[in-house]
């Protein structure tokens, strides 16, 4: 079982590391869209699509960058008691709390999938804005991000189990 967990951890961490590193550059795309929005409003006719595209890009940025954030230990913790605990005690508490995250992400994935299927099955759901883009592409990205977050959460659970059993998985940054 430990061998399976280590392979799963290595593969999921590698995938989410690559996706996260690519998504780090997504902020430049968002900045370019917002810069174009400002320039077009000042010198040309205002673009109708820029702010909504920036919102969609921000959703992709957060949803696909979230698993990388968890992997790097950049999530926020209440350090009142946690900071004084041993690594094994932290792993025990993390193993319990990550179960709640896995359950939450499972429901979120199921609901997101239902929303995506609704969007596709009714002739292509569109945004109610004046630009009216199709919503299935951003919903697909959200599903992918939730799925990657779920995989990363399972990876973190496996790391905590291995830490509890005395295996050195490194410390969370």
Image (cartoon, helix red, strand yellow):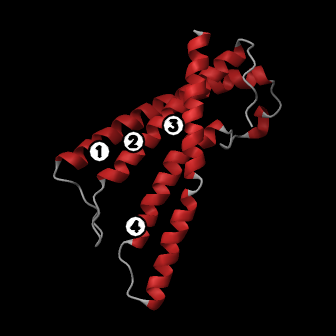
Mark 2 residue crowding within 10 angstroms, few (<14) / some (14–19) / many (20+): many
Percent of width and height locating residue 136: 30, 51
Q: Tell me if label 2 and label 1 are in contact, CB under 8 Å.
A: yes
Percent of width and height locating residue 142: 41, 46
The label number, if any, that marks residue 33 in the structure image: none
Mark 4 residue crowding within 10 angstroms, few (<14) / some (14–19) / many (20+): some
- Closer to the chain start, of discs 2 and 4, is 4
Q: Tell me if label 1 and label 3 are in contact, CB under 8 Å.
A: no
User: CA gap, disc 1 to disc 4?
Assistant: 19 Å
Residue at screen point 80% across, 27% down: 85
- Closer to the chain start, of discs 2 and 3, is 2
User: CA gap, disc 2 to disc 4?
Assistant: 19 Å
123 is higher (above) or lower (below) than 76:
below
Percent of width and height locating residue 17: 60, 39
Provide the secondary structure element on which disc 4 rests: helix
- For disc 1, the marked residue is 116
User: CA gap, disc 2 to disc 3?
Assistant: 10 Å
- For disc 3, the marked residue is 149
Q: Is residue 96 visible?
A: no
User: CA gap, disc 4 to disc 3?
Assistant: 24 Å
The label number, if any, that marks residue 143 in the structure image: 2
User: CA gap, disc 1 to disc 3?
Assistant: 18 Å
Provide the secondary structure element on which disc 3 rests: helix
Percent of width and height locating residue 173: 75, 37
- Closer to the chain start, of discs 4 and 3, is 4
- For disc 4, the marked residue is 52
Provide the secondary structure element on which disc 2 rests: helix
- Closer to the chain start, of discs 2 and 1, is 1
Q: Nearer the viewer, residue 147 or 23?
A: 23
Provide the secondary structure element on which disc 1 rests: helix
Q: Nearer the viewer, residue 6 or 107?
A: 6
Q: Give the farthest residue toward the left.
A: 123
């Amino acid at each position: 079982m430990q061998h399976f967990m280590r392979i799963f951890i290595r593969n999921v961490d590698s995938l989410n590391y690559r996706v996260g590193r690519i998504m780090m550059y997504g902020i430049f795309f968002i900045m370019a869209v917002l810069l174009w929005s400002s320039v077009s409003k000042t010198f040309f006719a205002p673009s109708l699509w820029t702010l909504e595209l920036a919102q969609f890009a921000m959703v992709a940025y957060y949803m696909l960058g979230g698993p990388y954030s968890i992997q790097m230990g950049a999530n926020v913790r209440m350090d009142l008691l946690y900071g004084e605990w041993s690594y094994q005690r932290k792993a025990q508490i993390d193993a319990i709390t990550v179960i709640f995250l896995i359950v939450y992400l499972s429901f979120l994935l199921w609901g997101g999938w239902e929303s995506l299927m609704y969007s596709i099955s009714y002739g292509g759901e569109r945004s109610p804005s004046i630009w009216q883009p199709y919503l299935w592409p951003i919903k697909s990205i959200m599903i992918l991000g939730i799925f990657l977050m779920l995989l990363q959460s399972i990876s973190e659970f496996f790391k905590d189990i291995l830490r509890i059993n005395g295996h050195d998985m490194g410390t969370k940054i």
